[in-house]
Image (cartoon, rainbow, N blue to C red):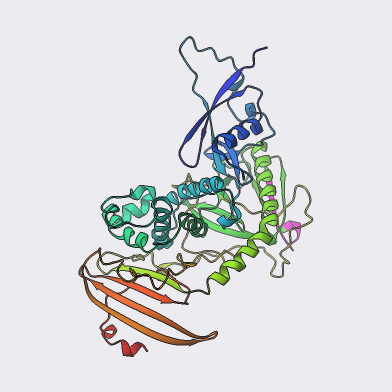
Amino acid sequence: MTVELRDVLVLLPTREQLRLVVGVQATGRELFQQVCDKTSIREVHLFGLSVVRNNEYIFMDLEQKLSKYFSKDWRREMHQGPGRRRAPFVTFLRVQYYVDNGRVISDRTARHLYYCHLKEQVLRSQCVHREEAYFLLAAYGLQADLGNHRERAHVGRYFEPQAYFPQWVITKRGSAYILRHAPAVHREQRGLSPKEAMLRFIREACQLEDVPVHFFRLYKDKKEDRATIVLGLTLRGMHIYQEVNHTPQLLYDFPWSQIGKLAFLGRKFEIRPDGRPSARKLVYYTGCASSSHHLLQLLRTSHQLHLRLRPTLRGLRQLEEEQEKKDYRESYISDALELDLHPAGSGASGRRASPRLSFLSANSQGSSLGMEPREMSVDGSLGTEALHGKVPSCSSSTSPSSRDTDGGSRGWREKDARDPDAGKEWSSTSPVTRVTTIVSHLQGPSGQVSFQLSVSSLGSGMLLWLVRGRAAPKWLPCHPFPDHLQHPRQWT
């Protein structure tokens, strides 16, 4: 008996396409295995196949038949006449479970696909209060994709801003501004291997609140016409947003340890904070029972992966903290005429922390083991495909339990201080008219700390700050060249 075949188009995070053929009775597992064989992925536990339903990505249960996730045309006879082929069924290979440390992915192919997925997420990110982070991410991306900045080859428009920056940054600053300043940050990554640049990109991208997240829309009550609640499954827990005048506002930030139970009954979705009576539970509704089942399954498996990887991530974090004790090199770029990272009304002084409504227990023990099969703490992530009015963008404030994301350049390791080109890397931008170097010693809690600060005043009015020391690096805008820097002794 002849087996009916179906064409399936699989879209990869690299923007490549796979055209595969499976039987009409095939399961998701069979299709997923073909994808892994074609792409040579060995570590597949972070990835899944998904389809789009109601503008949301729904991950397949790989043990189910593909007919469950495609239209009714899947089972119909495919007679289109001689010479005519039916359009393929489309699915996506996407990151299903996020990790903020790429070192847990040892497979080179899997790590590259994970990196490419995060790059796409960054392009849709809306963290307007973290604009400097996108320049650092672009520098890591350029270093990972192109290697060291080469003065002769990397001139002019050697990269497209749309491939490394969200559209709102391009609109605000302009392509000319990005093409003029991004190469300087790329140049500063000289000596960083593509693998290390990729790992740093993963780490920094996961500090943006709307990148390592899956978003799902919920209804406040079962009779509501339009979903106004958005659930975000994040790296550390679960966020609940509510749309007010089409603007998402963070209502709750639940870490995993403070979620007592999650339960579904049909469309009904209940969140029971740990240490509180059931009367204080939060109740929302999904679009249908199948959506409830999918969300519950994703929450369960995400939580299980979080528990399984926690010891490994803790060990890696300790190793990285030891590396942070080494010297750093960091660069600051400022243009007194153009660079204004905090315009009026949107700066740090103009931001107000949104109130956090919380039922969380102050003495919660942080354990989510031993939960009932349909009740669990949750850790998740949220897709950012519908950020423009459909999915919450990052606000300028986070709730107290949110992870600190300040300092987009945290973790930079200093390049060899004996590099003969050190201090000369900025010379190609414009003529240096004044250079001042200050060596200072500060007495801190951990003893005396020495650092060297070099300030170059360029002909265009831009200041370049090159700092070597053991202080944790931060990317900050600079001010016009102060007169007292002409007298370094005042700094000692």
Q: Quadrant of the N terminus?
A: top right
Q: Compared with residue 463, is residue 76 higher up or lower down, i.e. above or below?
A: above
Q: Residue at x 47, y 44 (%)?
A: 386
* Residue 35 covered by magenta stretch: no
Residue 164 shows up from this direction: yes
Q: Residue at x 42, y 54 (%)?
A: 141
Q: Residue at x 67, y 63 (%)?
A: 359
Tell me where the magenta segment starts and ends, as one range. Answer: 269-279
Residue 371 or residue 286, whichever sits in front: 371
Residue 281 shows up from this direction: no
List x then y, in percent, for residue 246.
Answer: 46, 50
List x then y, in percent, for residue 188.
Answer: 37, 64
Residue 54 or residue 11, whichever sits in front: 11
List x then y, in percent, for residue 400.
Answer: 57, 67
Residue 146 or residue 177, whichever sits in front: 146
Residue 460 or residue 298, whichever sits in front: 460
* Residue 273 covered by magenta stretch: yes
Judged left or right of residue 455, residue 203 is right
Q: Quadrant of the C terminus?
A: bottom left
Q: Quadrant of residue 467?
A: bottom left
Farthest residue toward the top? 82
Q: Quadrant of residue 417?
A: bottom left
Judged left or right of residue 481, residue 112 is right
Q: Compared with residue 112, is residue 354 higher up or lower down, i.e. above or below?
A: below
Q: Residue at x 70, y 48 (%)?
A: 300
Number of numbered tags placed on the structure image: 0
List x then y, in percent, for residue 262.
Answer: 71, 51
